[in-house]
Amino acid sequence: MPSDPTVVTVPSPLRRHVPQLEMSGLTWASEIGRYLVVIDDTVDSDEDARHGAFVLALNTSGVLDDQPLPVDGVDKIDDAEGITSDGKGTYYLQTSHSQNRRGVVKKPRRQLLRMKLRDRHLVVSGALDLLQGGEDVARQLAKLGVPADVGVDLEGLTYHDGALYVGLKWPLMSDGSALVMRMNHPDQVFSRGRLVDGDLVYWGQVKLTVPNDKGRLVSQGIADLQFAPDGALYLCANSPKGQPKDGGGALWRVTPPLGGTMSATLVRRFVGLKPEGLTDAPEPKTNALVLVFDRDRKDPLWMTWQLRP
C-alpha cells in the first residue's frame, strides 16, 4: 500500500461504464475483500442513468474492479459523500444533503441508507432524510446559532461504539469551527424511519485552520472522519464550496476525542490535493489509515498513513 498519494488503477471496462470517478468516501468490506468506495457523480453510461445507484470496489493494491456494485432498494443516488460499516455486516451510505447547481435539494441528495452486502449487491434495509423530522440537522444548527438559510454539506460519516457520527463540511461555526453530529441507536432510528427528538444531536466542534498560498488563514470543513485503533479521531478536511480556497486539504488528529470543543493537531498537509475519504486499513497489525483523493476530472489518488504505535 502506498505511503504517498498514488493514482488508482481504473480498468477499461469500468472507465467505459462509469466515466466520472470523483472518490469521496470508503470503507472495508471483509465479505468481498474490497473497499467499498462512493463517488460524487454516479453516472452510469450503460444504464443511461445520471444518478445511478451503485458503489465501486477497490482492492488493496489500488485497483478498481471492472464492475460497480449495485445498490438495490433505491432508484437514484446523487452526490454520495460518505460510507461506513459497523464491522458486523451493516453498511451506511450518506449523500451530501446539499443544494445542486440550481439551488435545489432533491430526494436523491437527501439520503442516509442502511444496507447489507449480498452477492455483490448492497441491499437497502432502511433510509432516512437528515433534513426532515424532529431535531434534524437544520434544527440542531439553529440551536447553535447558525442561520437556517445557509444550507448544509454533510460529507463525513463513521460508526463508533454503537453510534453514527456525521461530519459537516458546511456550515462552519462563526469562529470557523467544523461540526460533528452523532446519531444514537441508529438501528432504532432506521426501524422508525424518521428522526425524533434525541436521535441526532450536536456532539462536538473543532477548528481546522491552515494558511493558503497567500499566507491567509482558511477554515476547513470535514470531508471524512474515522476513530482509529490508536484511540484518536482522524479527520480529512478541505475548504467548503464557495469559501476561500485552502490550497490543499489536510489530515488532522483529535485526541482525546471526547466531544464538545476539541483541539486538533495537523498530521499532514496535501498541497494542491483534496483528501475526501478515510478509513482503517484492514490488514492485521498494520495500524494504518487509508485515504482517497478527489481530483475532479483526473483519476483519483489513494494512499495509506501509518499510525504511531
Image: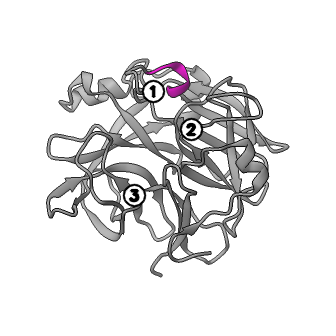
Instruction: Quarter of the image for the N terminus: give it.
Output: bottom right
Distance of label 2 from label 1 (alpha carbons)? 20 Å
Q: Is residue 223 magenta?
A: no
How many other residues sit within 10 Å of disc 3, few (<14), some (14-19) or many (≥20)?
many
Using the image as rendered, state which of residue 13 and residue 165 is in the foreground.
13
Distance of label 2 from label 3 (alpha carbons)? 23 Å
Q: Is residue 107 magenta?
A: yes
With respect to residue 3, does 261 lie above or below? above
Q: Earlier in the sequence, mark 2 or mark 3?
A: 2
The amino acid type found where label 2 is placed reads Asp
The local secondary structure at tag 2 comes to loop
Q: Which mark is residue 41?
A: 2
The amino acid type found where label 3 is placed reads Leu
Q: Which residues are magenta?
A: 105-110
Judged from this view, the residue extending furthest toward the bottom is 309
Q: Which mark is residue 97?
A: none
Dots 2 and 1: beta carbons under 8 Å?
no
With respect to residue 145, does 217 lie above or below? below
How many other residues sit within 10 Å of disc 2, few (<14), some (14-19) or many (≥20)?
many
Q: Earlier in the sequence, mark 3 or mark 1?
A: 1
Q: Which mark is residue 130?
A: 1
Q: Who's the residue at 62% across and 78% down the image? A: 285
- 244 horizontally vs 305: left or right: left
Distance of label 3 from label 1 (alpha carbons)? 21 Å
Question: Where does the image place residue 222, in percent across and percent down from the top left?
Answer: 36, 49
Question: Where does the image place residue 129, in percent across and percent down from the top left?
Answer: 50, 23
The amino acid type found where label 1 is placed reads Leu
Question: Where does the image place residue 33, in percent across and percent down from the top left?
Answer: 76, 60
Q: Which mark is residue 235?
A: 3
Q: Earlier in the sequence, mark 2 or mark 1?
A: 2
